[in-house]
């Protein structure tokens, strides 16, 4: 399974003292291929960043950035002075972590199981069917979930028939279940879709490795452990790092649809909070401040994860 | 709440119009106006006959944009970019447009001399419609799309809030008069005891409370009505107090008996805890299945359920709107007079404004002026005579087919100009002058049409009560208070307090209904303590605002 | 002892595929249920559907929801807009992202770290809606212009990273040997790396195409004023919103019946889902074949 490791033949490494510009000119083909997109992101992603100024303003669309009043850190103070904002940060992180763990584990397990299927038609069918729920709108999926988890719904009936519980559980109305319901629904909807990327990664595994392993008498679980898993490891690590950076995004649609006032302590995410107090109340400054806070935390998490990966000698994002 | 109620009003009033053509004027250079509508809608057909007439007559055609996403978000973008269409209906957030200077002052073009018809149209309500800008000038940004009606107020059914009950429950109870909270729940209790399930064995739900998102008005609004006032949103106004004493009601002692009653009914099993997590679709499904006996809601909010029940001929499972008040025992022996239906209210600041980017405001105003003529109004409302309606003995009539056409969406896209007329100034109520005097402007209000529709069950049902129409279950409209309806007031300055005020109610009220009866009092005290700061801030603001609005209207009158 | 082991293994090899197949079939049922339920609703009578409780088969069969959507000619114009922009965006994305991914996989590239950091950060920083809106509509004047669908979305960092990860899993020797033969980076990329990336390119193409096909927000923000440019999803979303609004606005049953014509928001929503998903289902197998079966890397390794 050992891969041919990079040996940096004619490349950099050996000539690092030659000066930046001469190296750059030697790599001009790479420059030509990469600089257009650099300019592109500078325009489309970075040039609007002046908008962050509004985080320090009482921004009014009519007055624009030039005309709006600066208020220092007031927007941030307002945010962090509110218990329900802090609460929504907690909820966001909790749901993200649950989603990330459940989602990743489920996707990898399914990808491996699919990879073990020899029958191509069956494999393709399962793969196609499982990704379909990705295309359903959240409204439909949550509506269905609400019926399934209702007090008189199938899950409660099942649990009662199995004598696991005596009284129906109030899944939708008790906040302790909420994060897990979100996790389960997300897995249900996205597991097939999330699998695609791992299945694609498995295609880069050299089939001869499996053949060799079979000849050596390695069992199925050893093949998975020593060939399949290492083969998708870099994809897994890179996705993990990227997703850790996204821990501040737990979405809002599912929480908004599934939540009710009974579970709001656990269901309100940062995005819902921002929607409620920012956009719809024309507190644009507050919305930007919350967005900025999210970005900063995201970047810290991202670099932390990247550093840890580097320390562990894993693939890194940056 | 405010936007919701505005929506109510718009829905309640959105009715189809239709017909004829007329006058010549020097044809002006043809132009296309860009139009934004702050609600969803369908693009009219290319060959639409009414738009063709407008084009022939005024040289004006329209390019419509309807709302697809979130209104405030869309308006926020348009304001930031100053990307305004010529005609701008900001829907329920039109105040945003006004605050941000997106609309022109129509009074530069509308006056008794220049536009006599438009002026006559707004004149009776001008005290409400015209306000002062920062510099003290009179301003009018939007001529209301609805609510400036001629003649006596038409109330055929309750379109707004009420306590609803299935007709079969009243039938079973021997057609009793139900006027108080206790009478209502006693009847429901007795009915459900005698009939725990429907014919198919599905258990009945006694009382549902929809709490989803902005529809939580079903949970938080009833107390003001039980206290004898029509809909003022989340505050109770004492119109007799001289200074329009206004307060939030939910935190007051007189709100407690209602939720205590619900708590009792919850423990009797009349209310299920699933009601608090139900989404709108599930609520409609429950109502449509005919197994929900009662609820507090607004008629338009469960329209689709009514429609499903009637379609299935389950007439006895459809609902009657009742105007309940507190029994005297709850309010120190007072007899409360019921008022669920209010005097008609202009839809202030709802409808088309002309944006500051528009290059031909005068031309638009002159077009509206021309369109306020009886000929154009008849064309918009009833259609083309001989084709879409006819006149018999001075009455406007439609054949069944013609009437069904006016309801058919696809037909309307070819033969009606609703995308334009719904947001434009228009005549409503009764036709006052001419050969057609006494007819209704709106097809849907014409008595021949309204009462021609009623099914036998309903006719029989009304006969048992000796009523003509379903609106007879409640008192006739009271006179509109000078401040209008308090939900129309812009509370942006206390937005955050208001949000807290709502959130705390959403959280506590279901708990209060579900808690053990012996814990109710303690939990109620906790609720009041928690909500008092935001309720006070919001309530005080509203009182000032109600006073100011009333003073403005009274002074201008 | 060895025989016993062998026997156990053989036993294992029968058990695992069976258990695996059963599990996967169960999983298919669980994930298929919501899909079939949606399809069932979409073929159900609208009024009847309001009562809920429809399982895998329509209770009162009706084609009205599809008729009401597909009878509007604007749907076909919108489908054309959506399809054409999807194809264009997908091609542009594959081109730009894979090229950049290759550059950033070259460890010797001196700008590698700098560009990577800048790219990666775009996934986590967002200027907010208003500045973005002003850039596109005011500075670049792309409102009500077809290009607004293409230009702002022709690159995605996430996809670039996915491709880069894939490329870095390919044997380095491929590049080394080509370079020794005198090939420049542009040629190495196009002639050697790009063809080897088919599985990951198919994956990325799928992500991009689905994203573009399903997007409506760009139309909503920038092209709402021009009905010729409406995308399919935007138009469908509008239809749903209109149905919902007219359901609430109808005053009488007769009016509701006529206005809605036996469709209700529930069935329209499901029919819309089906209409928007079927094209993806049709295209999917063509992409799927690249990533469900591996490519034979061995042959090119030498």
Image: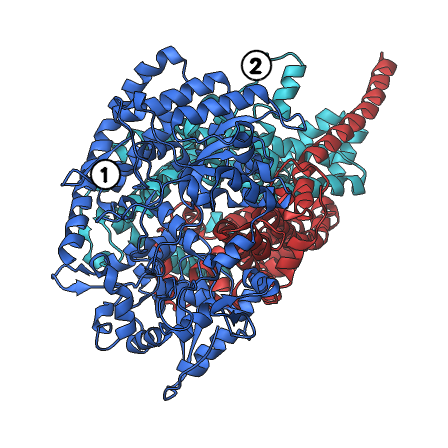
* Quadrant of image for the C terminus of chain B: bottom left
User: Measuring 26% from the left and 44% from the top, which residue is drawn there?
Assistant: B486
Q: Which chain is cyan?
A: A
Q: Which residue is mark 2?
A: A167
Point out residue C270 in the picture as x, y percentages from the top left corner.
Answer: 62, 47
Q: Are marks 2 and 1 in contact (CB under 8 Å)?
A: no
* Quadrant of image for the N terminus of chain B: top left
Residue C149, relative to residue A310: is it above or below? below
Q: Secondary structure at mark 1?
A: strand
B338 vs A262, left or right, is left
Q: Colour of chain C?
A: red
Q: Nearer the viewer, residue A160 or B115?
A: B115
Residue B501, relative to residue C83: is it above or below? above
Q: Which residue is mark 1?
A: B237
Q: Secondary structure at mark 2?
A: loop
Point out residue C298 in the picture as x, y percentages from the top left corner.
Answer: 73, 46
Q: Nearer the viewer, mark 2 or mark 1?
A: 1
Q: What chain letter is assigned to the residue under label 1?
A: B
Give the CA distance from mark 2 to mark 1. Answer: 45 Å
Q: Which mark is residue B288?
A: none
The reply to whether residue C77 is visible in this rendering is yes
* Marks 2 and 1 belong to one chain: no
Point out residue B454 in the picture as x, y percentages from the top left corner.
Answer: 56, 49
* Mark 1 Cα-neighbour bin, 10 Å: few <14, some 14–19, many ≥20: many
User: Measuring 61% from the left and 31% from the top, which residue is drawn there?
Assistant: A106
* Mark 2 Cα-neighbour bin, 10 Å: few <14, some 14–19, many ≥20: few
Point out residue B525 in the picture as x, y percentages from the top left corner.
Answer: 27, 18
Q: Nearer the viewer, residue A202 or C19?
A: C19
The quadrant in which residue B124 appears is: bottom left
C292 vs C268, left or right, is right
C121 vs C300, left or right, is left
């Amino acid at each position: 399974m050992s891969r041919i490791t990079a040996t940096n033949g004619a490349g950099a490494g050996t000539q690092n003292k030659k000066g930046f510009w001469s190296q750059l000119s030697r790599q001009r083909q790479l420059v030509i291929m990469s600089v257009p997109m650099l300019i592109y992101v500078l325009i489309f992603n970075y040039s609007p960043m002046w908008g962050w100024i509004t985080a320090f303003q009482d921004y009014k669309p009519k007055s624009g950035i030039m005309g709006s009043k600066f208020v220092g850190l007031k927007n941030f103070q307002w945010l962090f002075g509110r218990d329900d904002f802090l609460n929504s940060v907690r909820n966001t992180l909790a749901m993200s972590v649950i989603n990330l763990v459940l989602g990743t584990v489920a996707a990898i397990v399914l990808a491996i199981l699919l990879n073990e299927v020899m029958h191509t038609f069956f494999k393709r069918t399962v793969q196609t069917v499982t990704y379909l729920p990705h295309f359903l709108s959240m409204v439909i999926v949550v509506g269905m979930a609400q019926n399934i988890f209702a007090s008189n719904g199938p899950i409660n009936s099942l649990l009662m028939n199995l004598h696991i519980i005596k009284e129906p559980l109030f899944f939708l109305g008790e906040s302790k279940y909420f994060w897990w319901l979100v996790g389960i629904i997300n897995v249900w909807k996205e597991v097939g879709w999330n699998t695609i990327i791992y299945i694609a990664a498995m295609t880069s595994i050299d089939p001869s490795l499996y053949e060799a392993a079979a000849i050596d008498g390695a069992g199925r679980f050893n093949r998975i452990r020593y060939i399949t898993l290492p083969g998708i490891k870099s994809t897994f690590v890179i996705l993990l790092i990227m997703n850790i950076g996204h821990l501040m995004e737990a979405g809002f649609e599912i929480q908004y649809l599934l939540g009710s006032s009974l579970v709001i302590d656990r269901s309100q995410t940062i995005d819902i909070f921002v929607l409620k107090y920012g956009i719809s109340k024309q507190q644009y400054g507050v919305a930007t401040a919350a967005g900025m806070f999210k970005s900063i935390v995201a970047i810290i998490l991202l670099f932390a994860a990247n550093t840890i990966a580097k320390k562990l000698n894993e693939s890194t994002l940056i | 709440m405010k936007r919701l109620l505005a929506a109510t009003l718009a829905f309640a009033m959105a009715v189809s119009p239709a017909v004829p053509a007329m006058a010549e004027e020097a044809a002006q250079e043809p132009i296309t106006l860009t139009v934004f509508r702050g609600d969803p809608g369908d693009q009219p057909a290319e060959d639409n006959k009414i738009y063709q007439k407008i084009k022939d007559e005024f040289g004006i055609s329209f390019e419509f944009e309807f709302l697809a996403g979130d209104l405030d978000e869309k308006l926020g973008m348009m304001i930031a970019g100053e990307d305004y269409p010529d005609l701008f209906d900001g829907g329920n957030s039109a105040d945003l447009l006004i605050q941000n200077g997106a609309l022109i002052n129509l009074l530069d073009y509308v006056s008794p001399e220049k536009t006599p018809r438009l002026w006559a149209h707004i004149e009776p309500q001008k005290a409400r419609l015209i306000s002062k800008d920062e510099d003290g000038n009179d301003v009018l940004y939007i001529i209301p799309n609805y609510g400036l009606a001629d003649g006596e107020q038409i109330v055929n059914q309750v379109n707004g809030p009420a306590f609803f009950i299935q007709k079969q429950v009243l039938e079973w109870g021997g057609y009793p008069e139900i006027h108080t909270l206790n009478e209502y729940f006693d009847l429901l209790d007795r009915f459900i005891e005698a009939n725990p399930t429907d014919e198919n064995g599905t258990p009945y739900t006694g009382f549902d409370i929809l709490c989803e998102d902005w529809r939580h008005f079903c949970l938080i609004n009833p107390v003001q009505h039980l206290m004898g006032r029509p809909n003022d949103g989340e505050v109770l106004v004492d119109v007799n107090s001289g200074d329009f004493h206004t307060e939030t009601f939910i935190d007051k002692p007189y709100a407690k008996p209602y939720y205590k009653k619900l708590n009792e009914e919850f423990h009797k099993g009349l209310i299920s805890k699933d009601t608090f997590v139900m989404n709108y679709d599930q609520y409609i499904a429950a109502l449509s299945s005919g197994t929900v006996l009662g609820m507090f809601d607004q008629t338009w909010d469960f329209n689709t359920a009514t429609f499903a029940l009637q379609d299935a001929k389950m007439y006895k499972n459809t609902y009657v709107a009742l105007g309940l008040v507190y029994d005297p025992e709850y309010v120190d022996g007072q007899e409360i007079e019921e008022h669920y239906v209010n005097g008609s209210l202009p839809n202030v600041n709802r409808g088309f404004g002309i944006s500051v980017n528009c290059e031909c405001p005068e031309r638009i105003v002159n077009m509206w002026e021309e369109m306020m003529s009886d000929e154009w109004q008849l064309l918009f409302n009833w259609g083309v005579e001989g084709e879409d309606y006819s006149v018999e003995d001075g009455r406007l009539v439609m054949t069944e087919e013609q009437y069904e056409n006016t309801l058919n969406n696809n037909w309307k896209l070819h033969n009606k100009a609703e995308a334009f007329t719904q947001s434009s100034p228009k005549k409503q109520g009764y036709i006052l002058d001419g050969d057609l005097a006494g007819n209704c402007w709106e097809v849907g209000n014409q008595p021949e049409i309204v009462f021609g529709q009623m099914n036998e069950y309903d006719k029989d049902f009304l006969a048992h009560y000796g009523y003509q129409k379903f609106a007879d279950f409640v008192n006739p409209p009271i006179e509109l208070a000078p401040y209008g309806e308090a939900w129309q007031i812009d509370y942006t300055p206390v937005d955050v307090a208001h949000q807290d005020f709502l959130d705390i109610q959403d959280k506590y009220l279901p708990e209060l209904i579900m808690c053990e009866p012996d814990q109710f009092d303690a939990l109620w005290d906790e609720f009041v303590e928690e909500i008092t700061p935001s309720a006070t801030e919001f309530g005080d603001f509203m009182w000032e605002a109600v006073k100011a609005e009333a003073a403005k209207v009274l002074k201008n009158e | 002892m060895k025989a016993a082991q062998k026997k156990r293994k053989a036993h294992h090899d029968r058990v695992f595929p069976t258990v695996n197949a059963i599990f996967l079939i169960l999983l298919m049922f669980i994930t298929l249920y919501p899909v079939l339920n949606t399809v069932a609703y979409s073929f159900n009578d609208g009024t009847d559907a309001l009562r809920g409780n429809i399982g895998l088969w329509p209770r009162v069969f009706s084609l009205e929801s599809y008729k009401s959507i597909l009878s509007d000619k604007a749907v076909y114009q919108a489908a054309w807009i959506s399809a054409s922009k999807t194809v264009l965006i997908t091609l542009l994305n594959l081109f730009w992202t894979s090229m950049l991914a290759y550059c950033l996989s070259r460890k010797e590239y001196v700008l590698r770290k700098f560009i990577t950091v800048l790219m990666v950060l775009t996934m986590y920083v967002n200027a907010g809606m208003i500045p973005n809106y002003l850039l596109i509509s005011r500075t670049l004047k792309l409102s009500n212009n077809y290009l607004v669908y293409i230009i702002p979305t022709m690159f995605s960092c996430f996809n670039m990273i996915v491709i880069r990860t894939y490329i870095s899993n390919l044997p380095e020797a491929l590049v080394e040997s080509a370079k020794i033969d005198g090939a420049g980076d542009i040629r190495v990329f196009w002639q050697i790396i790009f063809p080897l990336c088919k599985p990951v390119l198919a994956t990325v193409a799928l992500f991009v195409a689905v994203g573009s096909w399903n997007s409506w927000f760009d139309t909503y923000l920038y092209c709402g004023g021009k009905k010729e440019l409406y995308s399919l999803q935007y138009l469908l979303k509008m239809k749903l919103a209109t149905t919902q609004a007219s359901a609430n606005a109808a005053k009488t049953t007769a009016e509701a019946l006529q206005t809605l014509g036996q469709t209700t928001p529930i069935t329209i929503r499901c029919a819309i889902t089906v209409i928007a998903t079927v094209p993806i289902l049709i295209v999917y197998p063509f992409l799927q074949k690249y990533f469900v079966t591996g490519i034979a890397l061995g042959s090119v390794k030498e």
